[in-house]
Amino acid sequence: MKKDSNIYVAGHTGMVGSAIVRQLQSAGFNNLVLRTHAELPLDRQQDVEAFFSSNKVEYVFLAAAKVGGILANVQFGGDFIEANLRIQTNVIGEAFRAGVKKLLFLGSSCIYPREAPQPINEKDLLAGPLEETNLPYAVAKIAGKVMCDALRAQHDFDAFTVMPSNVYGINDNFHPEHSHLVAGMMRRFHAAKVANDRSVVVWGTGRPLRELIFADDLADACIHLMSSYTEGGMVNVGSGHEVSVADLADQIRSVVGFEGALSFDHTKPDGTPRKLMNNSILKSTGWCAPTDLNSGLKQMYRWYLSSQAAE
């Protein structure tokens, strides 16, 4: 990518999309094409076709998606698979037909088998059953990855997939029911601190292991790969470090400053037991995540407090 390239970031108001915009602007990329959902509903094919026809987009970061935590995935699986299939099919297909030079599709580590060997390699995709709690979302993401590969194989369309580990950071979704792991915990610990509660309940046993990556680190990796990676297919992007849910809860408790106790609700689902990515392809390109978990959590909490104050 050149600094004057026309770059479309789909989903720029979300956590990962907004991080990509911050990192692009910080690196001197100024010709960014940005549209809100109200301006461009990506689930409407005619609107997406018109957008690409009237804008000379050269590069696409496809970070737009309908996302949520375990509860949201269980309750609204139909919405998740339909919305994501529509969004990614429209953007990938119309970008190809418009002659876009390169497209990066953001996947999710939930596409890997529930019992995948650890650390998880890119080749482990479809090697076993998926985690049932996020099956519709995972199937949609797999379809997007396969669509990129198929268009590359048939038409030499330069599209590839980035598969991030669990993402957290600035501009995350803190909804009480639909948030992901880190944001959901942070909101509950903050609320307990304000209310002077004696304890906070964490879903599950606390034993599952998760590899977390700060959203701005993921964004930096995406820009790095968009600028230098030419192999296609799929690239894992993670921090290379994993933490148990119990230890993560303890770190968030410390960052928030909640002094009460932790308890674990064993009646709630744990999700996948372990998800550690093999990041060797990414490392071979010369990139590794610079932000440690404690620093990332502190930045996230500062943003959360400022967003609360602004409301």
Image (cartoon, grey):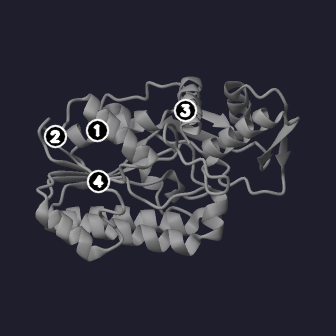
What residue lies at 58% left-to-right and 71% top-to-bottom?
77
* Earlier-in-chain disc, 1 versus 4: 4
Residue 254 in sight here: yes
**x, y percent for residue 75:** 65, 69
Residue tagged by mark 2? 1
Residue 130 in sight here: no
Q: CA distance from mark 4 to mark 3?
A: 36 Å
Q: Is residue 170 above or below residue 10?
A: above
Q: CA distance from mark 2 to mark 1?
A: 9 Å
Residue tagged by mark 1? 223
Task: Check disc 1 and report its element: helix, strand or loop.
Answer: helix
Task: Check disc 4 and report its element: helix, strand or loop.
Answer: strand
* Earlier-in-chain disc, 3 versus 1: 1
**x, y percent for residue 87:** 36, 67
Contact between marks 4 and 3 (CB within 8 A): the answer is no
Q: Which mark is residue 160?
A: 4
Q: Which mark is residue 306?
A: 3
Contact between marks 3 and 2 (CB within 8 A): the answer is no
